[in-house]
Amino acid sequence: MKTLVICVSIHHGNTEKIAKAMADILNADLITPTEVDEAVVSKYDLIGFGSGIYFGKHHRSLLDLVDKLPDQNGKPAFIFSTSGLRKMRLIHDFDKPLMGKLFKKGFKIVGEFNCRGWDTYPLWVKPFGGVNKGKPGEKELEEAACFARNLKKKTGF
């Protein structure tokens, strides 16, 4: 079974660190949305979609990629992200836009992972060096690896 991890990591490399930890466990290929097309996706049995969180949702290039994909007929997928703010289902559920698009394309979501990441974007935190400096650290990388191990057991990939 082949696994693909699609990752957007721009400012501090936070999400790429998490993606690499997962890809290592899943023996997955790790690429960016610009390297993906319909033919690429069809070669894989499990696909991970992840990015940092920008204004409450995943990166635009990841959302746009999903819009361009054909129906996936129940293909398993997982979502991951890093964010400056904590995820809160009722008021700050940043997985919702991506998850909705994946459902519409026929993906079956088999897992979600989020951890804090170093964030220097809000202007009010920049003078202080940002928030969550040093994140993701060893603890978060181990949590990502644990998520991937559990995903592997759950899906058989």
Image (cartoon, rainbow, N blue to C red):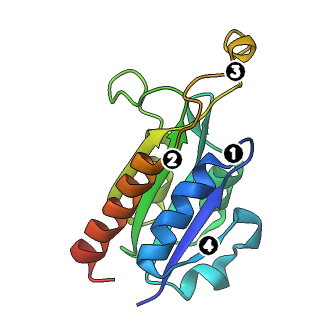
Numbered badge on residue 81: 2
- Mark 4 or mark 2: whose residue is earlier in sequence: 4
Q: Nearer the viewer, residue 38 or 10?
A: 10
Q: Gap in Å between the C-alphas at discs 1 and 4?
A: 18 Å
The residue singled out by tag 4 in the image is 30
Q: Residues within 10 Å of mark 3 (few under 14, many from 20)?
A: few
Nearest-to-viewer mark from 3 and 2 = 3
Looking at the image, is 60 positioned above or below residue 21?
above
Which element type, helix, strand or loop, lies under badge 4? Answer: strand
Position of the N terminus by quadrant? bottom left
Dots 1 and 2: beta carbons under 8 Å?
no
Query: Residue shown at 43%/28% (left/top)?
Result: 86
Question: Mark 1 against mark 2, which lies toward the viewer?
Answer: 2
Q: Identity of the amino acid at label 3?
A: Gly
Q: Are the two marked residues, 3 and 1, in contact with CB atoms closer than 8 angstroms?
A: no
* Residue type, label 4: Leu
Q: Position of residue 45 (x, y in %)?
A: 43, 83
The residue under label 1 is 60
49 on left or right of 147: right
Front residue of 17 and 58: 17
Q: Earlier in the sequence, mark 3 or mark 1?
A: 1
Residue drawn at 67 percent across, 14 percent down: 125
Mark 3 residue element: loop
Q: Position of residue 54 (x, y in %)?
A: 64, 34
